[in-house]
Image: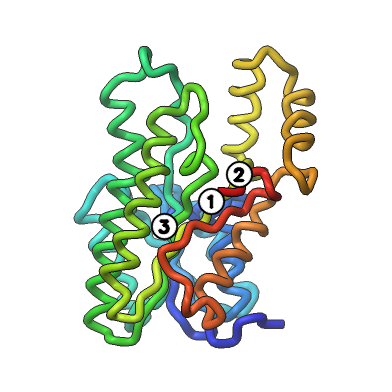
Amino acid sequence: MSQYPELSGKVAIVTGAGRPGGLGSAIAQRLAQEGAKVVVADLDTVQEMQAVVQEIIDHGVQAMALPCNMLNGSAVEKLVADTQAAYGGVDILINNAGVGYLMKPIVEMSLDEWDTVLGVNLRGMFAATQAVAKRFMAQGRGGRIVNIASQAAKSGFPHASAYCASKHGVLGLTRVAAIELAEHQVTVNAVCPNHVTTGLGAWQNEYFSKLLGKSVEQYLADMRARIPLGRAGLTSDTANACAFLCSDQAQYITGESMNVSGGEEMH
């Protein structure tokens, strides 16, 4: 049963949504549950993208896959133009694409690696926001932008200089976009999940447990102990937050950074 019936028929682009079981695909599927037409955008993982799209279509909702390299500004423009051509407009942008695997001490990270993380996580998000904002303004019917940030947008973690810097930047971009686009009835918000149980999350478990000299099991136990609600995040937790921020119930919320962390992050 739909929780936000006003989302039925809306057109949503979700970047970084092409991997089954990932955060982006969960967000795409959650919006599809509300009846939104979904564009699944990701790198050239066509087979995986089609699997996500087919799952949405199997539930009776329109969806399509569009490959897009967020480092390529022209490709981002084409993503938005192709969405417009296919569905007649755009109503929602979920900026989820990101790089989280490049973890190194500051003294070991190359400038190219730094640029890759900032390029996808921040520059790519800016490009998508800019392209969609132009569509929103031309359409004159408002819109929703939700940027997936992270607990790393509000805290610092060892070996994550580029990632933390990029996610802190996401909050700055979110706030400025919220101010500039408010007159067009476009809301812009960020969601800040903590650890989420995805493929990236499993990789980070391995990385940080080794860094701290712990077993993965002990690392996870310590994580649960410091989270007031006593568990790691689920993709559905973040997906539900996104659906709410896209709904009419959130029409007076903009420029915010919503923690989805079980109480671990409170500022």
Q: Which label lies toward us, 3 or 1?
A: 1
x then y, percent, for residue 178: 34, 66
How far is the residue under mark 3 from the one under mark 1? Answer: 12 Å
Which quadrant of the figure contains the N terminus? bottom right
Is 177 in front, or is 64? 177
In terms of secondary structure, where does tag 2 sit? loop
Determine crowd level at label 2: few under 14, some 14-19, many 20+ residues with C-alpha closer than 10 A: many
Observer able to see residue 244: yes
Q: Indicate the amino acid at tag 3.
A: Asn
Direction from residue 136 to residue 55 in the image, left or right? right
Q: Is residue 11 above or below residue 266?
A: below
In terms of secondary structure, where does tag 3 sit? strand
CB under 8 Å between discs 2 and 1: yes
x then y, percent, for residue 136: 29, 77
- Disc number for residue 192: 1
Determine crowd level at label 3: few under 14, some 14-19, many 20+ residues with C-alpha closer than 10 A: many
How far is the residue under mark 3 from the one under mark 2? Answer: 17 Å
Q: Indicate the amino acid at tag 2.
A: Asn
Judging by the rendered image, the residue that carries numbered circle 2 is: 194
Is 116 in front, or is 221? 221
Judging by the rendered image, the residue that carries numbered circle 3 is: 95
CB under 8 Å between discs 3 and 1: no
How far is the residue under mark 2 from the one under mark 1? Answer: 7 Å
Q: Indicate the amino acid at tag 1.
A: Cys
Q: Which label lies toward us, 3 or 2?
A: 2
Q: Is residue 84 above or below residue 147?
A: below
